[in-house]
Image (cartoon, coloured by chain):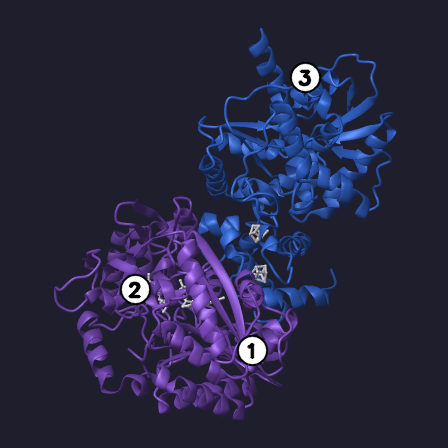
Amino acid sequence: MLDEKTKKKAFERIAAIVGADHITRHKTDQILNAHDAWPLSEAKLRAGEMLPLADLIVFPGTADEVSHVLIVANELKIPVTPVGGGAGTCGGTLPIYGGIQLDLKRLDKITEIDHTSMVVRVQAGVVGIDLEEEVNRYGYTTGHTPTSLRASNIGGFIATRSGGSMSSLYGKIEDLTLGLQVVLPTGSIIESKAVPRHSVGPDLRQLFIGSEGTLGIITEATLRLFPIPEERRFRSISFPDVHSGLEAIRKIFRVGILPSVVRLYDPEDAALSFSMHFEFEEGHCMLLLAFDGDLKKVDIDEKKSVQICLEEGGSDHGEGPSKRWWEHRYDMYYPSRLTTGGYAIGDTIDIVATYDKLENVYHAMKEVMEEEDAIVMSHFSHMYPNGGSIYMIFFTSQPDAETAWATYKRIWDAGVAACHREGGTMSHQHGVGLSRSTYIEDELGSSFNVLKTIKDALDPNGIMNPGKLGLGVRE
Amino acid sequence: MEPDTIAEQVRMCGACPKMCRHVCPTFFAWRSEAPTPHGRALLMHQEITGTREIDERGVEVLYQCLECSHCLTWCKPEIDIATLVEIKRRDLVKSGQQPEAISRLTGLVKKNHNPFGEEHSKRSDWIKTSNSKGSRVLYFTGCTAAYRETGSAQDTVSLLEHLGYSVEIAPDEWCCGSPLIRTGDVDSGFELAKHNAEVLNRTDVEAILVTCPGCYRTLTSDYSEYGHELNKPVQHISEFLRISLDKLPKGKFDGPITFHDPCHLGRHSGIYDAPREVIAAVSGSSVVEMERNKENAMCCGNGAGLRTMFPDHAKKIGDERIRHAKNVDAQYLVTSCPFCKNMLASQSENEITVLDLPEFVMMAEKVHYDKTD
Ligand SMILES: Cc1cc2nc3c(=O)[nH]c(=O)nc-3n(C[C@H](O)[C@H](O)[C@H](O)COP(=O)(O)OP(=O)(O)OC[C@H]3O[C@@H](n4cnc5c(N)ncnc54)[C@H](O)[C@@H]3O)c2cc1C
Ligand code: SF4
Ligand code: SF4
């Protein structure tokens, strides 16, 4: 927390930049703005605990204002934690060293849709669903369909390298972002031009995609658009085990088909998600597929994919489970009595690996997490020609807060260690934030030093989101 | 609601990953995490668990809620923030913690029997009724129509007479109590209820008609809940007109017509179809729906005292609703609430014609004659 003198000085100077209505130091605002959707924060709030608070919350309205606020923060050496939609799952917006929370929700303009190039220029604070609905009005989709679409912002998507459930076809946000405007920690505003590809040195835009607010503030982006597909078709196939399901997926990509949705539910997750609504053999996995495109292409892709699945030992269940998942995809994120009762806590470790390692990572993680008193269920999703991601979902319920938080940490430690041991990467789309911060050196190895050197060069006073992404951790 | 249920609900909601925030109009207006469903729940949760008392700013956040229940439409566990907030406001009023603007509002209603501070004697003395011989109905005008939307009030009377009714205005109608009940002062609200119930129960009419959904909700549910039963049926004008569709004036309107669902009529009273049927019968074409309609309709921004306390934010919400209507190229934005009409018309910048349902129907009458003259 800041001393009173610095806090007063910062308040007055920043109020002069953004206007008195757009800065607050009320404790109530500090509490209500503190947290994102990190399950540990949510569980602690339910348990009546207080989370770390910022001293000031600032709501800038333009990139210029962001720049001036950062100049003041630099001068006074105040930590700045950017806030997007506040629905990240890694504690990225927790102001663990106090200072300023820079909430970007007032950057809420959709500046321009360029119909010729099929791109949209949009400010960082626009909520995902608001952008999607606006471009839908013109016959487009962003192709970005994370289940946090209703809560997260464009800036947050980009800052965490997020991925939608249709990333197999449309790509993740790093594929969808053509241009960026970023305010550097020292206050200068830089633009990375929106071009489809380039050959002008390393792609600096990618430096900021996934930087989680540690290297600067994303204020605007140019995103790709796609025509809304003529047809979206769903298909579901059950498999006797994970192996045959994964083989089918691998072969579908190998023949050049890019389904929009590819999700393989392991026996536990399949039972929980579908057995109440559909009949399929106990202990079987369920593969959900969707195909987007024109009718003819969808027909061909679907037919060929089903044929591959049947050859791999799958049984066809029509559109049912897949379509149901799509229609109910938000449901599992709502609080329920079961998931919020007592000291219950769950989370997802969204790892990614190439096909040669994927199955081993899955089995190794599942085993060690279960040893730590976790119920584990998983689905393979966000699949690509060379590999894909696993949602290792776990849940534990303990008699008291202390045991619950300690168990939660042990499950994480064990899961990530197993992932690394088997050659996986610890996050496909959720990011690092606080929840994975301690593992980043294991993940990146010697290349962590490159990240650190860049951080020190861009943010000499270490003001930007300290403690996240393993950077700027203080004693 | 039982204290245990309240505790369970705010506990679940306070740490929800913001699943309904995108439709909360006060989140839209402030773009902050505080005036949100889960923000309000977290304040209450922390108080219940003894983590932290609700301070003055917390009270403000609770009073920024429009009680529009839009969040409930999107909440799978069906946590009703509007009701939870209203219950909490009652405690706040009891302990004298309500915002000053709300105390002033209560004072005005108590003194003048309307929230605008207008003279009670001028409430309805200007309304012209004729001596029709038809069956007798009582028009409970409500404060907004009586003082701020007089065109709507007069059109309501003319329309009812056009349909052959003999219209009475209550001799000593007071504010229905909605502004006080919704903002937590139930005791004062029910003094008004008691008075109105006595006055209304003495009249010799077949039905009581209301155009204001706030009055409708209060008269049909709050009055009886607190033991002030009315001895005749209370009907909303939209339902009343639906019975006589073929007798309504018909007219051709020169552009698309959309309908704004008032929260108290739609989400709180479940009336969605009646006004749409009336519009279709009168104009000969169905309503062009805004993207957010019926259970998913956005509030106009005028509810539960927000415009009194935060006029700029309330108007921002009204502006957005106007934008929704423009998105579907509507030329007429009809609602069935003088209060919503008042807000929406003030934000329409004359680019779109905003009408309360009785005004719309009477306009058809005029359009009709214009066309045939
Ligand atoms: C219900 C639910 C479902 C989810 N589903 C998915 C999913 O399908 N796919 C997926 O990828 N993720 C998912 N997530 C995780 C999360 O929503 C994403 O990681 C999202 O990208 C975070 O965006 P946000 O705007 O909420 O960011 P925030 O939580 O506000 O911030 C995330 C991080 O980015 C930083 N940051 C935010 N905005 C900026 C900016 N403009 N400039 C610089 N730094 C910034 C913050 O400091 C923080 O470190 C889900 C989360 C929830 C709660
Ligand atoms: S009202 Fe329901 S959906 Fe909205 S924040 Fe609360 S629990 Fe979540
Ligand atoms: S009732 Fe309306 S204003 Fe209040 S929290 Fe829910 S959506 Fe927001």
Q: Position of residue A144 (x, y in %)?
A: 39, 60
**Residue shown at the point (45%, 35%) measured from the top left:** B326
Looking at numbered disc 1 in the image, what kind of residue is underneath it? Asp
Chain under numbered label 3: B
Please name whichever residue, A20 or B245, is drawn nearer the observer in this view of the structure: B245
- Disc 1: which residue: A269
Mark 3 and mark 1 in contact (Cβ < 8 Å)? no
Mark 1 and mark 2 in contact (Cβ < 8 Å)? no
Looking at numbered disc 2 in the image, what kind of residue is underneath it? Asp
* Image disc number at residue B126: 3
* Image disc number at residue A175: 2
* Closer mark to the observer between disc 2 and disc 3: 2
Judge the density around disc 1: few (<14), some (14-19), many (≥20) Cα neighbours within 10 Å. some
Please name whichever residue, B163 or A56, is drawn nearer the observer in this view of the structure: B163
A275 w.r.t. B100: above or below: below
Looking at numbered disc 3 in the image, what kind of residue is underneath it? Trp
Q: Secondary structure at mark 1?
A: helix
Q: Secondary structure at mark 2?
A: helix
**Residue shown at the point (47%, 78%) measured from the top left:** A311
Image quarter of the N terminus of chain A: bottom left
Residue A14: in sight, yes or no?
yes
Mark 3 close to ligand 3, CB under 8 Å: no
Q: Taking A178 as reference, is B78 left or right?
A: right
Find chain A in the image and tell me its colour. Answer: purple
Find chain B in the image and tell me its colour. Answer: blue
Structural distance between the alpha carbons of marks 2 and 3: 67 Å
